[in-house]
Structure formats: C-alpha cells, structure tokens
Image (cartoon, rainbow, N blue to C red):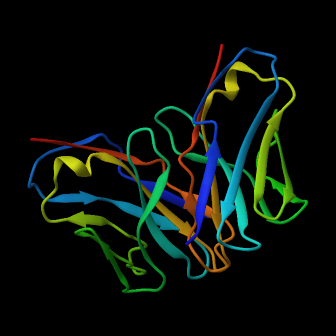
Amino acid sequence: GNSVTQMEGPVTLSEEAFLTINCTYTATGYPSLFWYVQYPGEGLQLLLKATKADDKGSNKGFEATYRKETTSFHLEKGSVQVSDSAVYFCALSDRGYQKVTFGTGTKLQVIP
Amino acid sequence: SQTIHQWPATLVQPVGSPLSLECTVEGTSNPNLYWYRQAAGRGLQLLFYSVGIGQISSEVPQNLSASRPQDRQFILSSKKLLLSDSGFYLCAWSLPNQPQHFGDGTRLSIL
C-alpha cells in the first residue's frame, strides 16, 4: 500500500534560517504529491502540490520538487518567519485523488 | 468560490452520550467528502469517505458512523461515545482529480 514518511519533529529554527523538512513516499504508479500546513487550532490548508516527476510546487516562499528517482518531496524555504510556525504534512494521492495518504506531520517552531 | 463549514468548533461530551458532527460544502456539486480524526500530536486517520449521496466507505471499524443525506452534507455520528473517541475531527471535500480542502475542525473531548 501507499505510505508517506516524514522527518520527526519538532523542528526549531531561528527566524531567517533555512528550512528543510524531509518527506519520502512509497506508492505504485505515479502519485500526486502535496504539502499541507496546519496552524494551531485550525484545519489543514493546501500549501503546494506537484503532479508529475520533476515538477516543482511553490507557494509563499516554500518549494518542493517531485523526485521520482529518490521517491522524495522535501519541503524547503530559504528564510523562515515566526508566522511559519505550524505543523506540516506531506501527502500523496493516486490518480483520481479519491484517497490521500498523509504523513504524521512535522511541527515547526520558529523563534525570533 | 467553494467553502466548507464544520460545526461545532468544540464539543465536550460525557462517555456514553450520542454524537452528531455536521459538515456542509457550498459552491460546488457532487464533491467527494471525507471525515478524518487527528489524535493529539499525531497524523490524520481517514474514517469515512463518500463519492455520492448515500454512498459511504468506512476505512476503520469503530464506534462511529457517517451519513450523506444530501449532496453537500456529511454527518459523523455515534450512538455511545467512548473515551477513545476524543480528538480533532476534520471534514474535507474534493472534486475528481483535485486536492482535498479541509474545514476548520471540531475538537471533541470526552469526559
């Protein structure tokens, strides 16, 4: 079956530091890949997505590249802000998007 | 534009009491609908999903049930809550070949 593995948190960074949250996946075929963000007490928001190999998703300064050869979709941001503090979920879905498999989430805390 | 509404936002219930959480979607037709549970500090567990009125697929056998009485309405229920039912419940919707979009969640505490 499909699975998503994320680096364990929490990740604590100083403001303006570089962020990487690792994500690897196991899936049959060619899944679509996503990063969702969950701010405290809220639901999940789609942050970015990539639907095929070598696609780069980007939004709000965050980027992730679909690497089929390494089955990875690592999230990066060049300079984090305190407002980026949240839990980040990597996810994948088969074609049709009917069911999504989520990672366990990585909590990011950015300190001033 | 499409919106999703979940209520209530928080709920405190005694063990053994019934439960009804409601989710509605506006601005689209025939969406796929989902219920997830998120235990404290953990990932998301898919509980139920529906691809149409009256069609419910259960992912995990448990104390909960789901119903879809109308196209854009998805209800999560229980006849008798257990302590283990505590958690953060999230409703989501999607269209075919599109990502899922989530509501703001219901925080359920069982006493």
Residue at 65% from the left image edge and 63% from the top image edge: B93
Vertical side of A96 occupied by A110: above or below: above
Q: Nearer the viewer, residue B103 or A33?
A: B103
Q: Nearer the viewer, residue A27 or A80?
A: A80
Quadrant where the image shows the C terminus of chain B: top right
Total numbered labels: 0
Quadrant where the image shows the N terminus of chain B: bottom right
Query: Is residue A62 rendered to the left or right of residue B15?
Result: left
Rendered location of residue A75, percent (x, y): 30, 64
Q: Work out which residue is located at the far right of the displayed protein and give it.
A: B54
Residue at 43% from the left image edge and 86% from the top image edge: A53
Vertical side of A98 occupied by B36: above or below: above
Q: Quadrant of residue A29?
A: bottom right
Residue at 20% from the left image edge and 64% from the top image edge: A77
Rendered location of residue A39, percent (x, y): 38, 46
Q: Nearer the viewer, residue B21 or A95?
A: B21
Rendered location of residue B92, percent (x, y): 63, 57
Query: Is residue A16 rendered to the left or right of residue B2?
Result: left
Rendered location of residue B52, percent (x, y): 84, 67
Query: Is residue A20 rendered to the left or right of residue A104?
Result: left
